[in-house]
Image (cartoon, rainbow, N blue to C red):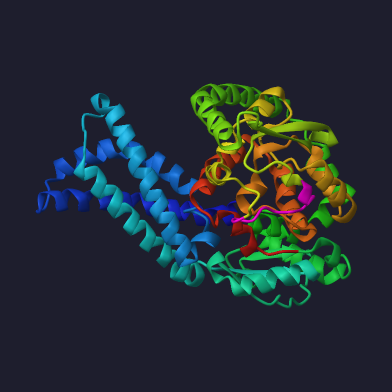
Amino acid sequence: MFIFRWRSFLLFLGDIPLFYAALALALITRRFSLIPLDFFLEHVKVFSVFVPVLAGVYYAVGFYDVRRINKLINLINSALIAFAVNLAAASALFYAFYLQLGLTPKTHLFLTILYMHILATAWRRVWTRAILSKFLAQRVAFLGSNPLVEEIKKDLGCTPHLGFTVVPLPELKAVGVGEGGYWRPNGSTCGDLSRKIDLLVVDAEDAEKNPAMEGLLLSTAVMEEIPIITHLDFYEDIYGKIPPEHAAKPSWLLSNVLHKNNPFYAVLKRALDIVFSIAGLIVTLPLSVAVSAAVKLGGGFHSHVFFMQERVGHLGRRFMIWKFRTMVYGADKAGPLYKAERNDSRITRLGRFLRGTRLDEIPQLWNVLKGDMSLVGPRPEWTREVEILERNVPHYHLRHLIKPGVTGWAQINYHATSSEAESLEKLHYDLYYVKNMSLAIDLGIILRTFRRVFQKDAGMAGKTALTA
């Protein structure tokens, strides 16, 4: 919803003038003097082609994620990664199309990217610490109360950088009829309620307990053009996940999953899976041969290159997943829900490198091509783990409503699970994707997946979000 997305949009709008300011600083630094306007505009025309690439990289590394960049260490980490990726991307762009662009900047390019990331980092620090939390904060009131609402209110009180200030619900007196014998709205410009709150979050079930006053408040909010949202939608948009206890209700399934029938999306997603899996297998073929040889050398001539394990997929169907072997034989004897630690002795030296770079996942493109998996979807789990989680995690089966993926919403927002409690939290994110899956979200997930290769703490981002 735009109620929430405008924060990232304004952050992006602020990056645009900063980019051209960085360009001007680079030109001035290089010439050690003020520059002619026509010289600057000539560079503006050429450098502008890089703005979409810059924004895409920023999105991929989480530079528009307000919850993430609030912490200084994460902000600096993201800035360094974004700088390295943008410098490489800009160099490739300018030197691949130098005939069309008419410029082959070297020092100018380096200084522009450097200054841009310094300015962008400072801009985000000011944005989260001052502008969003103090000047652009929205006053939000909650109608109704339940444990989830109370947790949301508590979390918003501890995270002012999200841009919400919880205010008490105003008391309204009964409104008399006007001269015409009926109640006429005052409009948003002179309403008393709109002066006190900017957003009304409603627990519909709780609101039904006192229909007279709740009805009056809702009607007034509508007439004064105050945005109204249910507490479940508010939770979903702020935290990017859905409480499974609500998702299991028939009303949620009927309105958000079972009624969905978008054959165009399904066909296009499958077509993209086939195209990208074939392309990926071809492009990575030399790398796969090298990895296979390294696994053989490390484990002996008779060692198996691939690790295969039975996983649960779409609608509970079982299939064999393929990965490059990264652990010693018999490692799975530790049993289900046993998470491999960083210094786990079961992981081979080569396996540690393959896991860190995600190269062990390459053979899963074969599963995508076969149709067992998609590029994007919930992570397929081992059958022995699913048997345990189905018994102990409420509504765990809902994640099997769609085809599993190599990467997914839960993978980029949460870490690998090793307990039932963690599996429940991860399910929150899987259900968000089940409800909101689209090509736009798929593209965003793929872009943000690259961040996991560079940032060791990226998988821990989910721990900062509200749990329910």
Percent of width and height locating residue 249: 88, 51
In depth, the one of 247 and 93 nearer the eye is 93
Residue 57: percent from left, percent from top = 44, 44
Q: Is residue 344 left or right of residue 151?
A: left
Q: Which image quadrant: the C terminus?
A: bottom right
Tell me residue 463's x, y (percent): 64, 62
Of 207 and 396, the residue lying toward us: 396
Can residue 196 be seen at all in this image of the molecule?
no
Prevalent SS, magenta region? loop
Q: Who's the residue at 21% across and 53% down the image?
A: 25
Picture quarter containing residue 253?
Answer: top right
**Residue 250 in sight from this viewpoint:** yes
268 in relation to 218, above or below: above
* Depth order, front residue of 308/405: 308
Say which quarter of the image contains residue 106.
Answer: top left
Report the number of numbered marks: 0
Q: Is residue 331 magenta?
A: no
Residue 178, relative to residue 309: is it above or below? below
- Tell whether position 341 is magenta: yes
Q: Quadrant of residue 424?
A: bottom right
Q: Nearer the viewer, residue 270 or 372?
A: 372
Residue located at (81% from left, 65% from top): 215
**Residue 439 pos. (x, y %):** 62, 34
427 lies above or below 172? above
- Highlighted magenta segment, given as a residue range: 333-343
Q: Residue at x 72, y 64 (%)?
A: 467
